[in-house]
Amino acid sequence: MNSQNNIVAKLNLNKYVSKLILHQPEDITYFDELQYDTEMTKEKYDLIFVFIYNMDQFKAYLDLVNRKQAIHENGYLFFAYPKKNNRKYEEYIDRDSFFQQNQVDEEGYISGSTLKFSRMVSMDDVFTVVGLKSQASKKGKQVSAKSSQRVDDYVEYIPSIRDYLSSDKELLEHYNNLTIGYQKDWARYVYSAKRSETQEKRLLQMKDILAQGYKSMDLYRRREQ
């Protein structure tokens, strides 16, 4: 497999010093020229290449690599997965699933990590490869995997809620008359969402629910129980 079109050449895998390849099918010979580990024996690698067959496996290895911080800065985590209509495996992964089923910020980072979606290439008629590069965010900090659920962490957003409600004096008064706990709870509900579109949606929900006289999303949800 010396063709310039094979995956080693496409991804320039020779340049990585420490390499780990997991769950490589026996009939795959692309990597024969490389020296690599088949078990995670080092703390960090420049390259980790994993064959997966469903999104659960993707998430499991993504979590493992992220938790162990197993990729050197500027290293790569690659996943090879069966493409749709391949003739070898019944299972396949739709390429859009990687973005639809994972928290990905506007820069392409998996939330709570320094792993950024970087490239997607075809390996052959069976597998496609998606790559994530380990690099610091240009924003200079990591985004938490999950937003804090402590209401006290959202007290600084209360003025933003008030500003949003300022065009409706009745709703603003209703909000201001709530206890500080309920005010922080609404701030948490709205601003724990990472995407601005979701925040806007939740702000509209909040206005509607406050207009109905409910003090919180939780009380609203329990109304019919």
Image (spheres, helix red, strand yellow):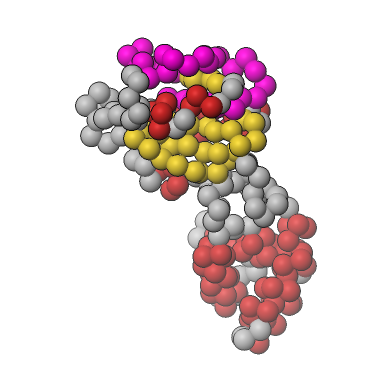
Q: Decide if residue 91 is in sight here.
A: no
Q: Magenta part mainly helix, strand or loop?
A: loop
Front residue of 128/61: it is 128
Q: Residue placed at 59% from the left, 33% from the top? A: 75
Q: Residue placed at 76% from the left, 69% from the top? A: 179
The x and y percentages for residue 177 are 74, 77
The answer to whether 60 is drawn above or below residue 30 in the figure is below
The answer to whether 207 is drawn above or below residue 156 in the figure is below
Q: In the drawing, does residue 23 fall left or right of residue 106?
A: left
Front residue of 9/155: it is 9
Quadrant of the rendered image containing residue 16: top right
Quadrant of the rendered image containing residue 69: top right
Q: In the drawing, does residue 103 fall left or right of residue 5?
A: right
Q: Residue placed at 45% from the left, 42% from the top? A: 119
- Please say whether residue 19 is one of the residues in the magenta stretch: no
The x and y percentages for residue 12 are 47, 30
- Please say whether residue 36 is one of the residues in the magenta stretch: yes
Quadrant of the rendered image containing residue 23: top left
Q: Decide if residue 110 is in sight here.
A: yes
Q: How many marks can you see?
A: 0
Front residue of 62/209: it is 62
What residue span does the magenta drawing correspond to? 23-51
The answer to whether 209 is drawn above or below residue 75 in the figure is below
Quadrant of the rendering where the N terminus is positioned: top left
The x and y percentages for residue 124 are 30, 29
Q: Residue placed at 54% from the left, 14% from the top? A: 37
The x and y percentages for residue 8 are 42, 26
The answer to whether 185 is drawn above or below residue 75 in the figure is below
